[in-house]
């Protein structure tokens, strides 16, 4: 079965031109079919604050009201997505910018209100793997931003780690999928202040223990949850690593069941 590499980058990378250029260069040299998923929360926060909108988070996830969604749409699908696509074109990578709205690629439903009302946030219901497979077979590189829709005209903000996990899982009938989460740390750290405290491997059991000890918390918990979700749905391997470690030898944290 052919291998596909799916790389997810976050706001720590997209708002830093030097880091982004490094990642796009390394990404462009990856062999075979590949995809890129990006967030952009830090850039979005900057634009929200310029509009007088205070960003709100709960459990590492964004609360999205109407005005917040308008800014996120402009930043994610416009500014960031097209800058990344243009950067890849400059590296002779035939990239194609997408959101979950385009081609009905990712259908979601508005998250039900429970302890927290997350507002216009979507939980993924279906990924059109055939559509994405068609792009890959045309030697195009899909670049997804973190937006989905509900099929009734409502765009929804959706966690980029979740989108990466769900796309990776949807492609498993066709490809051997490797999933990489890139950020500004060497991996999952036992001590956030010590870069040399990287945990090389995390299993389901060690993850439970790390949460109990409050070593993994806040924004890292949803990322780890999506990593394990991907593995349970058949994704071959999942890695969390620093933005400049995408080449070989790979260093960081490997997630295993």
Image: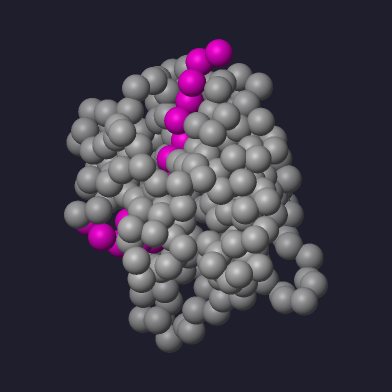
254 displayed left or right of 225: left
The residue depicted at 28 percent of the width and 41 percent of the height is 24
Image coordinates of residue 184 in percent, x first then y, are 34, 58
The magenta span reads 1-17
Front position in the image: 194 or 186: 194
Task: Look at the picture and state if 121 lies above or below 57.
Answer: above
For the C terminus, the quadrant is top right
Residue 107 seen in the figure: no
Quarter of image, res 79: bottom left
How many numbered marks does the figure carry?
A: 0
Where, quadrant-wise, is the N terminus in this rendering?
A: top right
In the foreground, 26 or 46: 26
Q: Position of residue 239 (x, y in %)?
A: 47, 42
Q: Give percent across and percent down for residue 162.
A: 59, 50
- Give the x, y percent position of residue 99: 51, 46
Instruction: Please determine whether, in this image, residue 247 is positioned above or below residue 123.
Output: above
Choose between 232 and 57: the one closer to the eye. 232
Q: Residue at x 19, y 54 (%)?
A: 18
3 inside magenta stretch: yes
State the image quarter where residue 111 is shown.
bottom right
Q: Residue at 78% of width from left, 65% of height from top?
A: 112
Q: How is the image coloured?
A: one colour
Q: Nearer the viewer, residue 238 or 75?
A: 238
Left or right: 210 in relation to 180: right
Is 56 covered by the magenta stretch?
no
Does residue 203 appear anywhere in the picture?
Answer: yes
- Residue 207's image quarter? bottom right
């Amino acid at each position: 079965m052919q291998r596909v590499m799916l790389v997810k980058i976050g706001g720590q990378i997209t708002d830093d031109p030097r880091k982004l250029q490094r990642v796009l260069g390394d990404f462009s040299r990856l062999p075979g079919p590949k995809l890129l998923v990006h967030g952009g929360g830090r850039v979005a926060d900057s634009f929200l604050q310029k509009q007088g909108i205070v960003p709100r988070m709960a459990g590492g996830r964004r609360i999205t009201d109407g005005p917040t969604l308008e800014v996120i749409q402009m930043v994610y699908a416009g500014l960031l997505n097209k800058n990344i696509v243009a950067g890849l074109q400059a590296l002779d990578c035939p990239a194609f910018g997408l959101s979950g709205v385009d081609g009905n690629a990712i259908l979601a439903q508005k998250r039900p209100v429970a302890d927290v009302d997350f507002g216009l946030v979507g939980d993924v219901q279906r990924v059109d793997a055939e559509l994405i497979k068609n792009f890959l077979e045309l030697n195009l590189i899909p670049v997804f931003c973190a937006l989905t829709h509900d099929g009734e005209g409502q765009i929804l903000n959706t966690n980029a780690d979740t989108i990466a996990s769900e796309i990776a899982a949807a492609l498993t009938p066709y490809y051997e999928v490797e999933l990489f989460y890139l950020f500004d740390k060497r991996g999952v750290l036992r001590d956030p202040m010590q870069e040399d405290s990287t945990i090389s491997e995390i299993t389901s059991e060690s993850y439970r223990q790390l949460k109990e000890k409050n070593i993994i918390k806040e924004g890292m918990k949803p990322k780890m949850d999506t990593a394990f979700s991907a593995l349970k749905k058949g994704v071959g391997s999942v890695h969390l690593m620093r933005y400049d470690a995408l080449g070989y030898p790979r260093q960081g944290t490997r997630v295993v069941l």
